[in-house]
Image: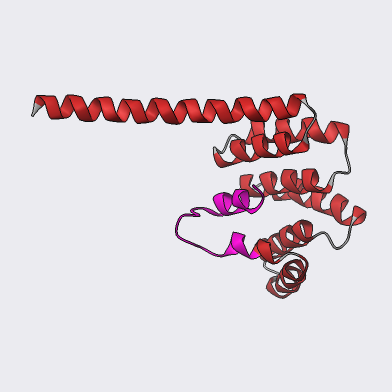
Amino acid sequence: MAPTIIILSLFFITVFIVISIQKSLKKDNYNNLIKKNDFKGFLKLTKLYLREKKWDKAIDTINRWLKQDPYHLRGLSTKAFVYYFMGNFNEASEIIEKGLKIDPNYSEFLYLASELEREKGNKESGKELKEKAYEKNKNLKIIDTWYAGYGSKIDRYVSLYK
């Protein structure tokens, strides 16, 4: 019995170490992209922090990109999604308003606006906005659809743009 426990313990320790190393390598890879000023690095690192629910790090990372390009739609929408998932609807709403002034048809802002309308109890206007968002980007349906393996709404959002 004791050898089995030792073997199982070593197995779980090894798995934990491998997962930790993989996360570290991912972060290093994303940081290298950031050093090259590649938006994908900022986006991927932000989403990694989002998945880990490290809200402050997610906001800080995407803000570093937005300092360079304050009107970057994907950057703004990602920041709005982080605030939305945090439950900070006022901040998300301000970013959505700014984004919709830049592009009134940007699907991610329309989707988030629909979610905020639903939170306020305005189901009809929320439904209309969501249908408009889906017309522009059918992939957004993934966020609202539960599939085995996608897990939480955050996981489904992160899976949209790999």
Measured as percent of width and height from the top left, residue 76 is found at 80, 45
Horizontal placement of 15 versus 121: left or right?
Answer: left
Residue 149 vertical placement versus 72 (above, below):
below
> Which residue is drawn at the image coordinates 88% and 61% (left, top)?
104
Residue in the foreground of this view, choosing between 49 and 45: 45
Measured as percent of width and height from the top left, residue 149 is found at 46, 55
Residue 82 vertical placement versus 6 (above, below):
below
Magenta segment includes 161:
yes
Horizontal placement of 34 versus 151: left or right?
Answer: right
Residue at the limit of the structure toward the left, as seen here: 1
> Which residue is drawn at the image coordinates 74% and 36% (left, top)?
62
Magenta segment includes 79:
no
Q: Give the quadrant of residue 115.
A: bottom right
Which quadrant would the N terminus be assigned to in this image?
A: top left
Residue in the foreground of this view, choosing between 141 and 113: 141
Measured as percent of width and height from the top left, residue 89 is found at 70, 50
Q: Give the quadrant of residue 121.
A: bottom right
Residue in the foreground of this view, choosing between 161 and 74: 161
Horizontal placement of 130 versus 2: left or right?
Answer: right
The boundaries of the magenta stretch are 141-162
> Which residue is drawn at the image coordinates 74% and 28% (left, top)?
34
Residue in the foreground of this view, choosing between 150 and 128: 150
> Which residue is drawn at the image coordinates 16% and 28% (left, top)?
5
Measured as percent of width and height from the top left, residue 130 is found at 72, 68
